[in-house]
Image (cartoon, rainbow, N blue to C red):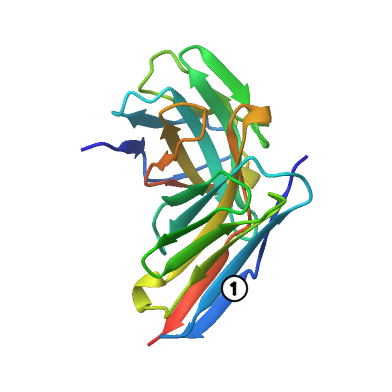
Amino acid sequence: EAQVTQNPRYLITVTGKKLTVTCSQNMNHEYMSWYRQDPGLGLRQIYYSMNVEVTDKGDVPEGYKVSRKEKRNFPLILESPSPNQTSLYFCASSLSVVGNEQFFGPGTRLTVL
Amino acid sequence: GQQVMQIPQYQHVQEGEDFTTYCNSSTTLSNIQWYKQRPGGHPVFLIQLVKSGEVKKQKRLTFQFGEAKKNSSLHITATQTTDVGTYFCADRNYNQGGKLIFGQGTELSVKP
């Protein structure tokens, strides 16, 4: 089944404790992206990647890192999480950067205490 | 930076009534995509509009792209309880690496 998977689905952590949220897609998509969703703000892009070893900042990249060592995986790293990073995070992928629908993962609900 | 404004934020309707959400931008939109997110779920792609003045239909859903490519709308005829969720428009901005710039979404509730 074609899908985007994320892990973990839920995470409660404390300020400053490094964490990684994994994202994987099995559709051979070139384009992958991370979004955070907050009430009243919709979805905002954190980072995106147009292909392996190519990543770039979105609208809200502060406090986050990403890597794209392989086509299928696009982990999101929070080196020192803070409470303002409490949010619902979605990974998404699309065939390419040009005009294709994005397929979203199931989401990761992160709480930073 | 570019902003995509979406109204209304909430809409409560009786089952069978129509529903419309509007998406506006001060700058020209590249491609408008519409997504639906069910409560507790993730956004799911509905459709993409590319051409000025384009109109597309999916059963009871009608999507329009403005002539000036600065606005778009989604209209649902005769809502059903299965239409419940949040509807987002998003501009796929090729000048910014193809990222999706989302509107704030319209949350639709349908009373049976």
Q: Nearer the viewer, residue B105 or A68?
A: B105
Tell me residue B69's x, y (percent): 68, 49
Amino acid type indicated by mark 1: Tyr
Question: Where on the picture, by quarter, is residue B28?
Answer: top right
- Position of the N terminus of chain A by quadrant: top left
Tell me if I can see residue B97 in this picture. yes
Q: Which residue is drawn at 47% across and 77% down?
A: B109
Could you tell me residue B77's position as x and y percent?
45, 76
Front in this rendered view, residue B90 or A23:
B90
How many residues crowd around disc 1 within 10 Å: few (fewer than 14), some, or many (20 or more)? few
In the figure, A9 relative to A58: above or below? below
Q: Is mark 1 on a helix, strand or loop?
A: strand
State the image coordinates of residue A24 (x, y, percent, origin top left): 35, 29
- Whether residue A113 is visible: no
How many marks can you see? 1
Q: Mark 1 points at which residue?
A: B10
Residue A30 drawn above or below residue A90: above
Residue at (42%, 80%) from the top-left corner? B78
B112 relative position to B90: left or right: left
Check the image and name the residue furthest to the left: A1
| Of the pair B11 and A83, the residue shown nearer to us | B11
Identify the residue at horizontal 63%, vertical 54% (top origin): B103
Q: Which chain carries label 1?
A: B
Left/right of residue B72 with respect to residue B79 in the rendered view:
right
Q: Residue A19's x, y, as percent?
A: 48, 31
